[in-house]
Image (tube, rainbow, N blue to C red):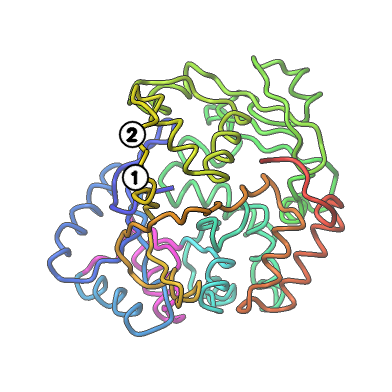
Protein backbone atom coordinates (compact mmCIF):
# COMPACT_ATOMS: atom_id res chain seq x y z
CA UNK A 1 0.00 0.00 0.00
CA UNK A 2 1.14 3.52 -0.71
CA UNK A 3 0.44 6.58 1.43
CA UNK A 4 -2.25 8.73 -0.14
CA UNK A 5 -0.11 11.82 0.26
CA UNK A 6 2.63 10.46 -1.96
CA UNK A 7 5.00 9.58 0.87
CA UNK A 8 7.82 7.10 0.61
CA UNK A 9 7.51 3.41 1.31
CA UNK A 10 10.49 1.08 1.71
CA UNK A 11 9.45 -2.57 1.45
CA UNK A 12 12.54 -4.65 2.21
CA UNK A 13 15.32 -3.24 0.01
CA UNK A 14 13.37 -0.98 -2.31
CA UNK A 15 11.90 2.51 -2.38
CA UNK A 16 8.67 3.53 -4.08
CA UNK A 17 6.99 6.85 -4.54
CA UNK A 18 3.32 6.98 -5.27
CA UNK A 19 0.36 9.28 -5.29
CA UNK A 20 -3.29 8.37 -4.99
CA UNK A 21 -4.76 11.87 -4.84
CA UNK A 22 -5.11 13.18 -8.39
CA UNK A 23 -3.21 16.29 -9.46
CA UNK A 24 -5.78 18.90 -10.38
CA UNK A 25 -3.96 22.15 -11.05
CA UNK A 26 -1.03 23.73 -12.84
CA UNK A 27 0.55 24.73 -9.52
CA UNK A 28 1.45 21.09 -8.90
CA UNK A 29 3.05 20.49 -12.29
CA UNK A 30 6.64 21.33 -11.41
CA UNK A 31 6.58 19.26 -8.25
CA UNK A 32 5.22 16.36 -10.29
CA UNK A 33 7.97 16.86 -12.89
CA UNK A 34 10.63 16.85 -10.18
CA UNK A 35 9.28 13.62 -8.70
CA UNK A 36 9.33 11.93 -12.11
CA UNK A 37 12.96 12.95 -12.55
CA UNK A 38 13.87 11.63 -9.11
CA UNK A 39 12.25 8.31 -9.92
CA UNK A 40 14.08 8.13 -13.25
CA UNK A 41 17.39 8.90 -11.57
CA UNK A 42 16.83 5.93 -9.24
CA UNK A 43 15.85 3.73 -12.15
CA UNK A 44 12.44 3.38 -10.53
CA UNK A 45 8.88 4.51 -11.07
CA UNK A 46 6.41 7.07 -9.80
CA UNK A 47 3.07 5.36 -9.26
CA UNK A 48 0.19 7.70 -10.03
CA UNK A 49 -3.57 7.17 -10.10
CA UNK A 50 -4.23 8.54 -13.57
CA UNK A 51 -7.66 9.21 -15.09
CA UNK A 52 -9.52 7.01 -12.63
CA UNK A 53 -13.11 7.39 -13.77
CA UNK A 54 -15.12 7.53 -16.96
CA UNK A 55 -15.99 11.23 -17.17
CA UNK A 56 -14.33 14.31 -18.65
CA UNK A 57 -12.86 15.29 -15.30
CA UNK A 58 -10.97 12.01 -15.17
CA UNK A 59 -9.76 12.43 -18.76
CA UNK A 60 -8.60 15.99 -18.06
CA UNK A 61 -6.00 14.54 -15.68
CA UNK A 62 -4.36 12.87 -18.67
CA UNK A 63 -4.63 16.05 -20.74
CA UNK A 64 -2.87 17.99 -17.97
CA UNK A 65 0.05 15.55 -17.93
CA UNK A 66 0.39 15.40 -21.70
CA UNK A 67 0.18 19.17 -22.14
CA UNK A 68 3.02 19.67 -19.68
CA UNK A 69 5.26 16.92 -21.03
CA UNK A 70 4.79 14.69 -18.01
CA UNK A 71 4.29 11.41 -19.84
CA UNK A 72 7.59 9.72 -19.07
CA UNK A 73 9.25 6.34 -18.77
CA UNK A 74 9.25 6.69 -14.98
CA UNK A 75 5.45 7.10 -14.87
CA UNK A 76 3.44 4.05 -13.81
CA UNK A 77 -0.22 4.93 -14.40
CA UNK A 78 -2.77 3.19 -12.20
CA UNK A 79 -6.15 2.52 -13.84
CA UNK A 80 -6.03 5.06 -16.73
CA UNK A 81 -9.67 4.14 -17.17
CA UNK A 82 -10.78 7.26 -19.06
CA UNK A 83 -8.15 6.79 -21.77
CA UNK A 84 -8.99 5.53 -25.23
CA UNK A 85 -6.81 3.30 -27.45
CA UNK A 86 -4.93 6.25 -28.97
CA UNK A 87 -4.25 7.68 -25.52
CA UNK A 88 -2.83 4.36 -24.39
CA UNK A 89 -0.59 4.36 -27.45
CA UNK A 90 0.72 7.81 -26.55
CA UNK A 91 1.43 6.61 -23.02
CA UNK A 92 3.29 3.65 -24.48
CA UNK A 93 5.21 5.91 -26.85
CA UNK A 94 6.50 7.89 -23.87
CA UNK A 95 7.62 4.70 -22.17
CA UNK A 96 5.00 4.97 -19.43
CA UNK A 97 3.52 1.82 -17.94
CA UNK A 98 0.00 0.75 -17.01
CA UNK A 99 -1.04 -0.79 -13.70
CA UNK A 100 -4.27 -2.63 -14.49
CA UNK A 101 -6.84 -3.54 -11.79
CA UNK A 102 -9.80 -4.85 -13.80
CA UNK A 103 -12.02 -6.10 -10.97
CA UNK A 104 -11.96 -2.84 -9.03
CA UNK A 105 -12.55 -0.90 -12.27
CA UNK A 106 -15.59 -3.01 -13.08
CA UNK A 107 -17.06 -2.89 -9.58
CA UNK A 108 -16.77 0.89 -9.36
CA UNK A 109 -17.37 2.00 -12.93
CA UNK A 110 -18.64 -0.98 -14.92
CA UNK A 111 -15.72 -0.51 -17.32
CA UNK A 112 -12.03 -1.34 -17.58
CA UNK A 113 -9.29 -1.20 -20.17
CA UNK A 114 -9.77 -3.97 -22.72
CA UNK A 115 -7.10 -6.62 -23.24
CA UNK A 116 -7.07 -5.99 -27.00
CA UNK A 117 -6.56 -2.25 -26.58
CA UNK A 118 -3.76 -2.94 -24.11
CA UNK A 119 -2.09 -5.35 -26.53
CA UNK A 120 -2.54 -3.13 -29.58
CA UNK A 121 -1.18 -0.04 -27.81
CA UNK A 122 2.06 -1.81 -27.02
CA UNK A 123 2.04 -0.47 -23.47
CA UNK A 124 3.90 -2.46 -20.82
CA UNK A 125 1.44 -3.44 -18.12
CA UNK A 126 1.36 -5.07 -14.71
CA UNK A 127 -1.70 -6.40 -12.90
CA UNK A 128 -2.62 -5.24 -9.41
CA UNK A 129 -5.48 -6.07 -7.04
CA UNK A 130 -6.10 -2.42 -6.04
CA UNK A 131 -7.65 -2.25 -2.55
CA UNK A 132 -9.81 -4.53 -0.44
CA UNK A 133 -13.21 -2.72 -0.64
CA UNK A 134 -13.55 -3.29 -4.39
CA UNK A 135 -10.50 -5.24 -5.51
CA UNK A 136 -9.62 -8.90 -5.61
CA UNK A 137 -8.63 -10.87 -2.57
CA UNK A 138 -5.16 -11.34 -4.09
CA UNK A 139 -3.35 -11.54 -7.43
CA UNK A 140 -4.52 -15.10 -8.06
CA UNK A 141 -8.10 -13.85 -8.17
CA UNK A 142 -7.18 -10.76 -10.20
CA UNK A 143 -5.49 -12.97 -12.80
CA UNK A 144 -8.74 -14.85 -13.26
CA UNK A 145 -10.67 -11.63 -13.86
CA UNK A 146 -8.09 -10.52 -16.44
CA UNK A 147 -8.17 -13.95 -18.10
CA UNK A 148 -11.97 -13.96 -18.38
CA UNK A 149 -11.93 -10.50 -19.95
CA UNK A 150 -9.22 -11.68 -22.30
CA UNK A 151 -11.35 -14.63 -23.43
CA UNK A 152 -14.32 -12.32 -24.07
CA UNK A 153 -12.05 -10.07 -26.16
CA UNK A 154 -10.86 -12.85 -28.47
CA UNK A 155 -7.75 -13.82 -26.46
CA UNK A 156 -5.33 -11.12 -27.65
CA UNK A 157 -3.15 -11.83 -24.61
CA UNK A 158 -1.57 -15.20 -23.92
CA UNK A 159 -1.36 -16.96 -20.58
CA UNK A 160 2.36 -16.16 -20.71
CA UNK A 161 1.57 -12.42 -21.09
CA UNK A 162 -0.58 -12.44 -17.96
CA UNK A 163 1.91 -14.52 -15.98
CA UNK A 164 4.61 -12.04 -16.94
CA UNK A 165 2.41 -9.14 -15.81
CA UNK A 166 2.63 -10.34 -12.19
CA UNK A 167 6.30 -11.35 -12.30
CA UNK A 168 8.96 -10.04 -14.69
CA UNK A 169 6.93 -7.17 -16.13
CA UNK A 170 5.71 -6.11 -12.70
CA UNK A 171 9.34 -5.85 -11.56
CA UNK A 172 10.30 -3.92 -14.69
CA UNK A 173 7.40 -1.52 -14.18
CA UNK A 174 8.73 -0.60 -10.73
CA UNK A 175 12.36 -0.60 -11.77
CA UNK A 176 13.14 -3.63 -9.59
CA UNK A 177 13.97 -6.04 -12.42
CA UNK A 178 17.65 -6.11 -11.48
CA UNK A 179 16.76 -7.85 -8.22
CA UNK A 180 13.54 -9.77 -8.66
CA UNK A 181 10.83 -10.87 -11.09
CA UNK A 182 12.79 -13.65 -12.80
CA UNK A 183 14.64 -16.81 -11.76
CA UNK A 184 18.30 -16.13 -12.49
CA UNK A 185 21.59 -16.40 -10.58
CA UNK A 186 22.14 -13.39 -8.35
CA UNK A 187 18.45 -12.46 -8.11
CA UNK A 188 16.47 -12.46 -4.89
CA UNK A 189 14.80 -15.83 -4.46
CA UNK A 190 11.15 -14.76 -4.26
CA UNK A 191 9.30 -17.93 -5.22
CA UNK A 192 5.73 -19.21 -5.40
CA UNK A 193 5.35 -22.99 -5.60
CA UNK A 194 1.99 -24.31 -6.78
CA UNK A 195 0.61 -27.80 -6.45
CA UNK A 196 -0.15 -29.75 -9.63
CA UNK A 197 1.25 -30.39 -13.09
CA UNK A 198 -0.55 -28.55 -15.87
CA UNK A 199 0.32 -28.82 -19.55
CA UNK A 200 0.65 -25.05 -19.68
CA UNK A 201 2.46 -23.76 -16.55
CA UNK A 202 1.31 -20.19 -17.21
CA UNK A 203 -2.34 -21.22 -17.43
CA UNK A 204 -1.82 -23.26 -14.29
CA UNK A 205 -0.82 -20.08 -12.47
CA UNK A 206 -3.91 -18.26 -13.74
CA UNK A 207 -6.24 -21.06 -12.65
CA UNK A 208 -4.56 -21.67 -9.28
CA UNK A 209 -6.32 -20.78 -6.04
CA UNK A 210 -5.05 -20.40 -2.50
CA UNK A 211 -5.80 -24.12 -2.09
CA UNK A 212 -3.01 -24.86 -4.60
CA UNK A 213 -0.28 -22.78 -2.92
CA UNK A 214 2.33 -25.15 -1.56
CA UNK A 215 5.12 -22.77 -0.61
CA UNK A 216 6.07 -19.07 -0.60
CA UNK A 217 9.75 -18.13 -0.37
CA UNK A 218 10.81 -14.50 0.15
CA UNK A 219 14.45 -13.58 -0.28
CA UNK A 220 15.42 -17.24 -0.08
CA UNK A 221 13.60 -17.78 3.23
CA UNK A 222 10.54 -20.08 3.39
CA UNK A 223 7.78 -17.89 4.81
CA UNK A 224 4.51 -19.74 4.21
CA UNK A 225 3.36 -23.10 2.94
CA UNK A 226 1.93 -26.51 3.71
CA UNK A 227 2.67 -27.43 7.30
CA UNK A 228 4.62 -30.58 6.44
CA UNK A 229 6.75 -28.75 3.87
CA UNK A 230 7.56 -25.90 6.24
CA UNK A 231 8.47 -28.35 8.99
CA UNK A 232 10.82 -30.16 6.62
CA UNK A 233 12.47 -26.89 5.53
CA UNK A 234 12.69 -25.72 9.16
CA UNK A 235 13.31 -21.97 8.59
CA UNK A 236 12.75 -21.18 12.27
CA UNK A 237 9.73 -20.66 14.56
CA UNK A 238 6.46 -21.55 12.85
CA UNK A 239 2.90 -20.39 13.47
CA UNK A 240 0.34 -22.98 12.45
CA UNK A 241 -2.94 -21.98 10.81
CA UNK A 242 -5.54 -23.27 8.38
CA UNK A 243 -6.12 -21.57 5.03
CA UNK A 244 -8.29 -22.81 2.19
CA UNK A 245 -8.94 -26.11 3.89
CA UNK A 246 -5.28 -27.04 4.39
CA UNK A 247 -2.95 -26.99 7.36
CA UNK A 248 -0.34 -24.30 6.84
CA UNK A 249 2.53 -22.70 8.63
CA UNK A 250 3.81 -19.14 8.63
CA UNK A 251 7.34 -18.08 9.56
CA UNK A 252 8.36 -14.56 10.46
CA UNK A 253 11.75 -13.32 11.59
CA UNK A 254 11.12 -11.13 14.66
CA UNK A 255 14.54 -9.49 14.41
CA UNK A 256 13.80 -8.25 10.91
CA UNK A 257 10.05 -7.75 10.84
CA UNK A 258 9.76 -6.26 14.31
CA UNK A 259 12.30 -3.53 13.62
CA UNK A 260 10.20 -0.36 13.77
CA UNK A 261 7.23 -2.18 12.30
CA UNK A 262 5.04 -2.38 15.38
CA UNK A 263 4.63 -0.05 18.33
CA UNK A 264 2.88 -0.32 21.64
CA UNK A 265 0.04 2.17 22.37
CA UNK A 266 2.45 4.43 24.25
CA UNK A 267 4.75 4.61 21.24
CA UNK A 268 7.45 2.22 22.49
CA UNK A 269 8.81 -0.29 19.96
CA UNK A 270 7.02 -3.58 20.45
CA UNK A 271 7.41 -7.17 19.41
CA UNK A 272 5.89 -7.96 16.04
CA UNK A 273 2.62 -9.79 16.83
CA UNK A 274 1.83 -13.25 15.58
CA UNK A 275 -0.89 -13.56 12.96
CA UNK A 276 -3.18 -15.04 15.59
CA UNK A 277 -2.47 -12.17 18.00
CA UNK A 278 -3.01 -9.53 15.32
CA UNK A 279 -6.25 -11.22 14.28
CA UNK A 280 -7.47 -11.35 17.86
CA UNK A 281 -6.58 -7.69 18.40
CA UNK A 282 -8.50 -6.53 15.33
CA UNK A 283 -11.45 -8.81 16.06
CA UNK A 284 -11.86 -7.48 19.61
CA UNK A 285 -11.54 -3.89 18.45
CA UNK A 286 -14.25 -4.33 15.83
CA UNK A 287 -16.56 -6.37 18.03
CA UNK A 288 -16.64 -3.90 20.92
CA UNK A 289 -14.75 -0.67 20.14
CA UNK A 290 -15.75 1.00 23.41
CA UNK A 291 -14.38 -1.77 25.57
CA UNK A 292 -11.28 -1.93 23.39
CA UNK A 293 -10.73 1.82 23.81
CA UNK A 294 -11.04 1.45 27.57
CA UNK A 295 -8.37 -1.26 27.58
CA UNK A 296 -6.05 0.93 25.52
CA UNK A 297 -6.54 3.81 27.93
CA UNK A 298 -5.49 1.58 30.82
CA UNK A 299 -2.46 0.34 28.89
CA UNK A 300 -1.33 3.93 28.47
CA UNK A 301 -1.12 4.24 32.25
CA UNK A 302 -4.40 6.10 32.63
CA UNK A 303 -7.53 4.96 34.44
CA UNK A 304 -10.75 3.65 33.00
CA UNK A 305 -12.44 6.68 34.54
CA UNK A 306 -10.86 8.69 31.74
CA UNK A 307 -13.60 7.43 29.44
CA UNK A 308 -16.45 7.85 31.88
CA UNK A 309 -18.79 10.56 30.77
CA UNK A 310 -17.06 10.78 27.40
CA UNK A 311 -18.50 7.71 25.65
CA UNK A 312 -20.21 9.91 23.08
CA UNK A 313 -16.83 11.40 22.14
CA UNK A 314 -15.57 8.14 20.64
CA UNK A 315 -15.19 8.59 16.90
CA UNK A 316 -14.13 6.73 13.79
CA UNK A 317 -11.70 8.44 11.44
CA UNK A 318 -12.50 7.34 7.90
CA UNK A 319 -10.48 7.90 4.76
CA UNK A 320 -13.68 8.85 2.97
CA UNK A 321 -16.90 10.25 4.34
CA UNK A 322 -19.95 8.15 3.59
CA UNK A 323 -23.23 9.88 4.30
CA UNK A 324 -26.10 7.44 4.56
CA UNK A 325 -27.66 8.62 1.31
CA UNK A 326 -24.55 7.85 -0.78
CA UNK A 327 -24.16 4.64 -2.68
CA UNK A 328 -20.90 2.68 -2.42
CA UNK A 329 -19.82 3.95 -5.83
CA UNK A 330 -20.57 7.55 -4.84
CA UNK A 331 -18.62 7.12 -1.66
CA UNK A 332 -15.56 5.62 -3.30
CA UNK A 333 -15.38 7.92 -6.30
CA UNK A 334 -15.99 11.31 -4.75
CA UNK A 335 -12.90 13.09 -3.53
CA UNK A 336 -14.17 13.44 0.02
CA UNK A 337 -11.90 14.78 2.78
CA UNK A 338 -11.02 12.78 5.87
CA UNK A 339 -13.96 12.94 8.24
CA UNK A 340 -14.62 11.90 11.80
CA UNK A 341 -17.83 9.99 12.48
CA UNK A 342 -19.32 9.51 15.94
CA UNK A 343 -19.43 5.87 17.06
CA UNK A 344 -23.00 4.77 17.86
CA UNK A 345 -23.42 3.27 21.33
CA UNK A 346 -24.28 -0.22 20.04
CA UNK A 347 -22.03 -0.12 16.99
CA UNK A 348 -20.30 -3.33 15.97
CA UNK A 349 -17.69 -3.39 13.24
CA UNK A 350 -17.53 -5.77 10.29
CA UNK A 351 -16.10 -9.24 10.64
CA UNK A 352 -12.57 -9.69 9.36
CA UNK A 353 -12.30 -11.30 5.97
CA UNK A 354 -10.90 -14.78 5.60
CA UNK A 355 -7.38 -15.04 4.21
CA UNK A 356 -8.65 -16.74 1.07
CA UNK A 357 -11.56 -16.59 -1.36
CA UNK A 358 -14.44 -18.26 0.46
CA UNK A 359 -18.20 -18.53 0.05
CA UNK A 360 -18.77 -15.17 1.71
CA UNK A 361 -16.40 -13.44 -0.69
CA UNK A 362 -18.02 -15.08 -3.71
CA UNK A 363 -21.43 -13.95 -2.44
CA UNK A 364 -20.15 -10.39 -2.21
CA UNK A 365 -18.84 -10.60 -5.78
CA UNK A 366 -22.16 -12.00 -6.98
CA UNK A 367 -24.02 -8.98 -5.53
CA UNK A 368 -22.00 -6.37 -7.43
CA UNK A 369 -24.39 -4.78 -9.96
CA UNK A 370 -21.66 -3.57 -12.34
CA UNK A 371 -20.00 -6.96 -12.83
CA UNK A 372 -20.91 -9.01 -15.93
CA UNK A 373 -22.90 -12.08 -14.96
CA UNK A 374 -20.52 -14.25 -16.96
CA UNK A 375 -17.59 -13.14 -14.83
CA UNK A 376 -19.49 -13.89 -11.63
CA UNK A 377 -20.29 -17.40 -12.83
CA UNK A 378 -16.72 -17.94 -14.03
CA UNK A 379 -15.19 -17.02 -10.66
CA UNK A 380 -17.70 -19.13 -8.74
CA UNK A 381 -17.03 -22.09 -11.03
CA UNK A 382 -13.23 -21.85 -10.83
CA UNK A 383 -13.14 -21.55 -7.06
CA UNK A 384 -15.71 -24.24 -6.31
CA UNK A 385 -14.20 -26.63 -8.88
CA UNK A 386 -10.55 -26.22 -7.89
CA UNK A 387 -11.10 -25.31 -4.25
CA UNK A 388 -14.21 -27.07 -2.87
CA UNK A 389 -13.85 -25.19 0.44
CA UNK A 390 -15.06 -22.02 -1.30
CA UNK A 391 -18.48 -23.53 -1.86
CA UNK A 392 -19.07 -24.36 1.77
CA UNK A 393 -18.74 -22.71 5.12
CA UNK A 394 -16.14 -20.16 5.96
CA UNK A 395 -12.87 -21.95 6.79
CA UNK A 396 -9.48 -20.77 7.96
CA UNK A 397 -8.16 -17.28 8.43
CA UNK A 398 -9.46 -14.64 10.79
The residue labelled by disc 1 is 310
Q: How crowded is mark 2: few (under 14 residues within 10 Å), some or many (20 or more)?
A: few
The alpha-carbon separation of the residues under discs 1 and 2 comes to 8 Å
Mark linked to residue 18? none
Image side of residue 240 versus residue 24, left or right: right
Label 1 with label 2: CB-CB less than 8 Å: yes
**Residue 239 vertical position relative to residue 308 in the rendered view, above or below:** above
Q: In front here: 74 or 300?
A: 300
The residue labelled by disc 2 is 306
Image side of residue 210 versus residue 294, left or right: right
Q: Please tell me which residue is depicted at 51% across the width and 18% down the height of the picture.
A: 254
Image side of residue 300 versus residue 361, left or right: left
> Residue furthest toward the bottom?
56
Where residue 140 sits in the image (x, y, percent)?
Answer: 67, 52
Q: In front here: 238 or 69?
A: 238
Image side of residue 16 versus residue 160, left or right: left
Decide whether residue 78 is among the magenta residues.
Answer: yes
**Residue 321 vertical position relative to residue 269 in the rendered view, above or below:** below
Q: Residues within 10 Å of mark 1 (few under 14, many from 20)?
A: few
- Helix, strand or loop under label 2: helix
What's drawn in magenta, residue-wise? 69-98
Decide whether residue 355 is among the magenta residues.
Answer: no
In which quadrant will I find the C terminus?
top right
Amino acid sequence: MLPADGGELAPRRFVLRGRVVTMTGEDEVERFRSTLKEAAARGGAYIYHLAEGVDQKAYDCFVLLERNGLLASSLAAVHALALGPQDLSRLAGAGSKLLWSPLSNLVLYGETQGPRDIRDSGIAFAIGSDWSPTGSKNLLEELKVAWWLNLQDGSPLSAFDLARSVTAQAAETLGWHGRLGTLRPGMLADLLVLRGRGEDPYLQLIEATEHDVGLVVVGGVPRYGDLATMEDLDPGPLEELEVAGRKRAFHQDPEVEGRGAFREPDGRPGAFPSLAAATDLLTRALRDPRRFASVQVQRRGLTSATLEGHEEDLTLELDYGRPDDWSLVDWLTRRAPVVVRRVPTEWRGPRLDALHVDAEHLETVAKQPNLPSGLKHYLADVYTRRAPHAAGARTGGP
